Image (spheres, coloured by chain):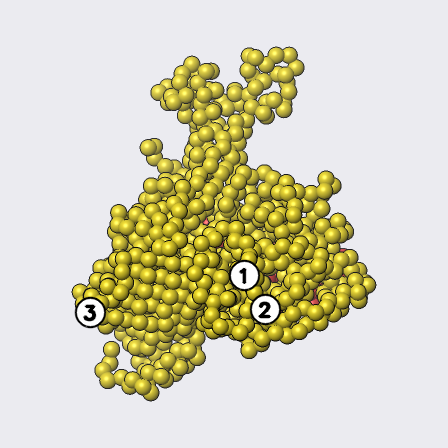
Amino acid sequence: MKREIELKVNGIIQEVVVESWWSLARVLREGLGLTGTKISCESGDCGACTVLIDGKAVKSCLYPVMKAKNKDIVTIEGLIDQQGQLHPLQDAFIKHFAVQCGYCTPGMIIAAKALLDENPKPTEEQVKEYLSGNLCRCTGYKKIVESILAAAEKI
Amino acid sequence: MAELTVIGKNIVKIDALEKVTGKTKYASEEGIGIPGMLYGKILTSPYAHARILNIDTSKASRSKGVRAVLTGKDTPRHRDGILIDDRHVLCHERVRFVGDTIAVVAADSVEAAEEATKLIQVEYEALPAIFNAEEAMQPDCPVILHPELANYNRPAYGYLGNDLPGPNVHTHHKIRKGNVDKGFQEADLIIENRFQNDRITHCQFELYNSVCYPESDGSLTLWTSGRNAITLQNMCREFNLSRSKLRVRTSYTGGMYGLKARTARFTILLALKTDRPVKMVYTREDCFIDGLNRLPKIIYVKDGIKRDGTILAREIKVIVNTGAYTDYAPLTIRNGGFHASQYRLPNYKWDAYGVYTNEPPCGPLRGFGNAEALWATEQQMDIAADKLGIDPLEFRLLNTVDEGEIDVRGQRVHSIGAKECLRKAAEWIDWDKPLDQPKDKHIKIGKGIALGNKYSLGDTASSAMVKTNLDGTIEVFHGGDDCGQGLNTVVAQIAAEEFHVPIEKVKVIFGDSARVPYDYGTASSRSTLYIGNAVLLACRDAKKKLFELAAKKLNTTPDGIDIRDGKLFIISDPQKVLDISGLALGKSPEATGLVKWATCLEEGAGIIGTASFWGHADQEDPETGQGERLSMSVAYGGQAVEVAVDTETGIVKVLRVCSAFDNGKSINPKMCEAQIEGGVALGIGSALYEGFIFNDKGELLNPNFHDYKICSMINVPSGDNNKLGMVEYPHRAGPYGAKGVGEAAMTPTAPAIANAIYNAIGVRLYHMPMTPERVLQAVRKIERYHPPTTKK
């Protein structure tokens, strides 16, 4: 059934018309035009759709939009600060060549932010363990791990 | 030559900023929120092989929101293909694999389209199916997939249709050199083995998708997640359209490693029928089944070797299960024959057969035939070294070809750093240092090495345009694609180097058949060399034109002029400068009156440079596979790995990997490294985890990322445990000496891991992926039949 709901995304409360059974990922992309959140595996295995919900990394392709009401949602578009500065993770991904096709990148960066918020100085092993649910087919992960460790140094 | 200031430098990728901020518009973002958009869905066959008796679409057509339901009868009668015209856009009288496309639907919403596909009623008469390529290739095989094969058109490489041993065999590629029988007679040691690899797929993260817009002038604009706008225009043939009626657009693609274009033809079909824009996105399952997977092969290798380690003869028979249609498979089969170019093989015989079966069709996947062949032959090298008592590294070095030698295909070897790659990889993994085995008796550690390579196609061409603007900026138009490998950054670096401008002043235009000149496109690790050359030559063409104009104004000769930051200057007198805007037509003395203000003319004074580059390939002899110039360049790579094998569970973990690759010259070293790192991960995945599992009805049981595992972060070594570097043996035809390295990256990984497993536990695995089940089976077999007498 179609409903109009309010979602708080990247600090802004917006009204959006949704089908009640839609996933949050679909609403972000098709309802709000926040297409930085990607849909890839459709089964919660790859993490391309990762967003922050109340500070926790969540796979938004499996997250019902109706559950997202009254929650604080952050997508990749919300990572740049108010002065327009990149988040240190974004900067590190650029400088360490951790981006290839870029399709996993937004979800990867969001998941890495959740990690650093929880554990500001993770070890290499902790990074790999935490992000093992965020897959990438291009990079082989080496430069992603380097980027996250480098960003942790900066934060 | 002046010192290079941009080439060879780690210039930040020009698309990195937009990608880390989530702004990049991939094809998957095209058409979102556009009113009037229709959404397409496919209906596929539940049978591996069946006759279609009747299709009733009446219920589906009446379903709410449905605008079109199309079946085979709505598609052209003729078949199409890449090398063999063997497939209809939608099935006509027969389905040939579980997943063969029977119908397409366009509706107002994805859900309405999906609902309608369920209402299409198809009556089938099931036919016996065949899945085993060795059975399917027999002359008396009772199941024949394409009874009319002999009459099919072969638009390219027609000689691959000669000498076919059975009715399901569509391709036979031969290489003949010397006399293998004589070589085997003279050999001290004969080694024969059978290797096999399962089907894998690309798992690009962007789901296959396209959008087709009917334009007001009756033409179509197609957006697709595929690659190569210009070659995709070939689809016109399937719809009897002229090329000018189909504009193809691509964007940054969400991964490639092969192909992902099949949604395109369905959206074209639906847009033509409905005169409405149509968007179609494959499900992940569709992407597995209709994804043109990597070819499953059975490879028999027979080697004849002298006691001193000289290989005298090698005979290879390859049986390739190409599934129900051929697509790129015949070329993949033929090009797999290039893998052997790294060793000195005086007597050589290769027969590769492509066989139709009732499995999904196959196509290109990173390596285009080489990786699977090397999976077999690089293990064979270790088996031989072991029997001869020679170190596997030394055995390889002994047989690796050198610059100037003639390879097994008759080509003169050029730009080969293979030996240095092997030595570097070995050095980094401490090849000669014995390993400390862990205290846990079930865990055994071993090291392995392999040499890989990947050719780049010889018979293709690229062209490029370079536009110089009056503000000093440069626009580069090319017909390749940036799938993440960084082609746009490479061509921007080339233009920045040639015009001595910061990279920010270069704009790259790509992925639009209406704007870019001809290109075979991004494939075969060819972009850096071919497209890079075309861009380099186009830059020089533009500079030549600029310098000729400037020479008149500066009262000198064109060869005395250079350009930097949009300013032309006399080389011998750099104070004499002419801003590029000074070449504007409006500033010409011939321009009088109002023309002086005509901006269109001023802009028209922008100089356009154009150039083409092609491979000048030689004809291959169809009987011997020989030719002096069949491939353009070859990238080589040595990889050494250290693995831990748990003999209780069969689980293999890659602990360290060291890779050295010869790419001629790194235009951007970090991007080259990144290619190798990605190749390593795909290589590890293919070696240990990835493989299609079908049931006996031909249904794919694991078409998702849950049951088909690709490497996650914890499966791939990082930091110092993943060491790599480039060795640069410049290629004479490459821009600045560069050659493509993207595909070579994964070619040695799987056999290196297999060799390391053998080193760890003395068990040889012939079937990829080397899953825990297969490792355990092999361990048990050895324990039962060949209990160890001495510890290795």
Q: Residue B142 appears at what percent x and percent y?
A: 53, 74
Kind of element beneath mark 3: loop
**Label 3 or label 2, whichever comes before in sequence order:** 2
Residue in front for this viewpoint, B139 or B461: B139
Which mark, residue B97?
Answer: 2
Label 1 resides on the chain identified as B
Q: Looking at the figure, which quarter contains the C terminus of chain B?
A: bottom left
Residue in front for this viewpoint, B35 or B337: B337
> Label 3: few (<14), some or many (≥20) within 10 Å?
some
| Residue at figure coordinates x 40%, y 18% from the top left | B557
Q: Is residue B120 left or right of residue B597?
A: right
Chain displayed in red = A
**Label 3 or label 1, whichever comes before in sequence order:** 1
**B691 in relation to B507, above or below:** below
Q: Which residue is mark 1?
A: B149
Q: Looking at the figure, which quarter contains the N terminus of chain B?
A: top left
Which mark, residue B188?
Answer: 3
| Residue at figure coordinates x 36%, y 61% from the top left | B350
Q: Nearer the viewer, mark 1 or mark 2?
A: 1
Chain displayed in yellow = B
